[in-house]
Image (cartoon, rainbow, N blue to C red):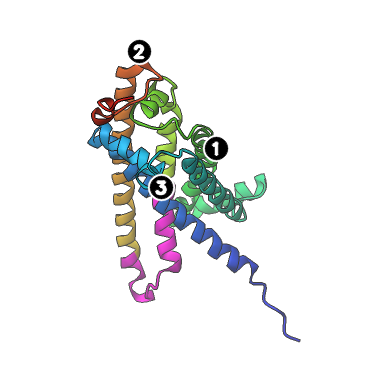
Amino acid sequence: MTRKLDRGPARADILQSLTGLLLVLFIWGHMFFESSILLGKDAMYWVTKMFEGEPLFGKPYPLLVSVVAAIIFALIAVHAVLALRKFPGSHRQYREFNAHMGAMRHPDTTLWYVQVATGFAMFFLASAHLLVVFLQPDNIGPYASSDRVWSGRFWLLYAPLLVCVHLHAGIGIYRLAMKWGPIPAASSKVVRRRLKFAMWGIIAFFLCLGTASLVTYMVIGREHAPYAGERYLPAHKQSQPG
């Protein structure tokens, strides 16, 4: 009698990879939109209103931002639950894994360990950030975001989140390419080396972009601190009647 194959683990692996890919694409896109502050307050204001649907509906609907935050949190939760299957489940397993990693000294095993550590930290850091966005979707903008970062001391949350999320995302994309990419065995070493070079380049790029954006928000927030809570309006809206 033929034993039926259990396809559950394979399907869970596919779902974990898919949710991970969606989250990486989201965070990279999010970083580009967030860094619009580097182009000026008007650029960041326009991006904010775009996500609130103002160009499409004629007026802003911050609820749309809450919906996106809820979807991203759901993706993170599914991804985290699926990833937990591969974490050491006890102190003994954790010790054995550490001993195994130390004996092998395999770079990709170390990268996986970094993903475990950053993923664990991110579940709490990203959840805190998403909760604020979900509950206060109208509190986003050149001054509102800068006030939160500086006067609200959220830079203490965003700085470690920035490092964790881009390490996790960059390593994740590398591991997805190695796992699912059609890589010929004969050229696997060359491909691995090139992918790692690309991985570190991507991580460095987004860390630099994110740091520049965070510092800019902090500078604006510090200058705006005496007027914290006041909302930014571009010049063309200030001149409008009413």
Disc 2 target residue: 226
Q: Which mark is residue 227?
A: none
Q: Earlier in the sequence, mark 3 or mark 1?
A: 3
User: Viewer-proximal residue, 71 or 125?
Assistant: 71
Name the mark nearer the viewer: 3 or 2: 2
Residue 193 place in picture, x, y as percent: 32, 61
Q: Residues within 10 Å of mark 1 (few under 14, many from 20)?
A: few
Count residues near mark 3 (Cα–Cα under 10 Å), then give few for <14, some for 14-19, many for 20+. some
Say which amino acid is labelled 1. Phe
Residue occupying image coordinates x 48% and y 49%? 115
Query: Label 1 belongs to which residue?
Result: 124
Q: Earlier in the sequence, mark 1 or mark 2?
A: 1
The range drawn in magenta is 166-191
Which residue is drawn at the image coordinates 27% and 25% (left, top)? 238
Query: Which of the image's four quarters has the N terminus?
Result: bottom right
Spatial CA distance of label 3 from label 1 is 16 Å
Coordinates of residue 147 in the picture (x, y in percent):
39, 23
- Looking at the rendered image, the quarter that the C terminus falls into is top left
Instruction: Identify the amino acid type marked 2.
Output: Pro
Is 43 placed left or right of 226 in the picture? left
Local crowd at mark 2 within 10 Å, few (<14), some, or many (≥20)?
few
Gap between marks 1 and 2 measured at Cα: 31 Å
The tag earlier along the polypeptide, 3 or 2, is 3
Image position, residue 57 (x, y; %): 40, 45
Left or right of 178: which side holds 136?
right
For residue 63, above or below residue 150: below
